[in-house]
Image (cartoon, rainbow, N blue to C red):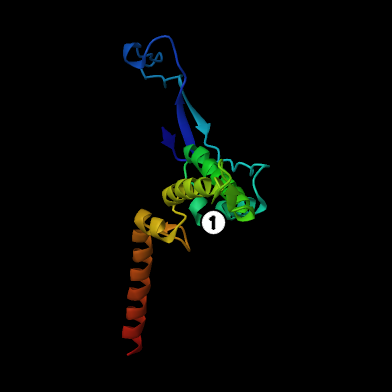
Amino acid sequence: MFVGRFWQVRVSRKKPPERRQTSRTRSGEHKPDPTLVLVRAAAPRVPPPQPQWRPEVVEAWNDFWMSPLADSKLLAVTDQPALLRLFEFRSRLLNAIAAFEAEPIVEGSMKQATLSPWALEVNRLETVVAKLEALFGLTPMARMKLGISFEEGISLAARNAQLLEAFQASQREAGEVT
């Protein structure tokens, strides 16, 4: 359980908690459960970009981690594998696009001109990347569906509350002036 800035971790003992006898001090007070410890919650570690990624993807990776979308309130540590997959697929997509643009038409098995197999790979990767981008709120529509204001990384409800407060303050000032 998360308590403030600490995780409450139960250290296992031989008996489950419901079968343990409560221990008391000589004065009759209950002793605190010695199996409960508090561990400082570490800030989520930002994984470094993969060495095989293209420079554009590395730049996008760094931009993502500098954006409000990487806030620990919006992005859990358990989301990092999917996020790594997204950027890996982005890099593969750029490689596939480059290979397709280099040779869009290839010779088929019967010596006929045919579309490069890279076209199918580009199509497949674009679909996967689009789905993952939507999950992480990396498109305007996805942010709107998730209720996130991109410029601040806050929920839509919180942004509306800020706008209402600013409007009410301006109305109070206008009422005081007239």
Coordinates of residue 5 in the picture (x, y in percent)? 49, 40
Residue 23 can be seen in this image: yes
Q: Nearer the viewer, residue 127 or 44?
A: 127
Quarter of the figure that contains the C terminus: bottom left
Horizontally, residue 52 falls left or right of residue 82, namely: right
Q: Mark 1 falls on what kind of element?
A: loop
Q: Residue furthest top?
A: 14
Coordinates of residue 45 in the picture (x, y in percent)? 58, 40
Q: Amino acid at mark 1?
A: Ser
Count of picture labels? 1
**Image point 45% across, 40% down: which residue?**
4
**Image point 38% across, 13% down: which residue?**
23
Residue 61 can be seen in this image: no
Count neighbours of disc 1 (C-alpha within 10 A) and say few if under 14, some if 14 to 19, many if 20 or more.
Answer: few
Asked if 166 appears above or below 100 in the picture, the reply is: below
Q: Residue furthest bottom?
A: 178
Asked if 114 appears above or below 78 in the picture, the reply is: below
* Res 140 quadrant in image: bottom left
Quarter of the figure that contains the N terminus: top left
Q: Nearer the viewer, residue 43 or 30?
A: 43
Coordinates of residue 128 in the picture (x, y in percent)? 46, 45
Residue linked to disc 1: 67
Q: Nearer the viewer, residue 79 or 55?
A: 55
Asked if 1 appears above or below 73 in the picture, the reply is: above
Coordinates of residue 123 in the picture (x, y in percent)? 48, 49
Asked if 38 appears above or below 118 in the picture, the reply is: above
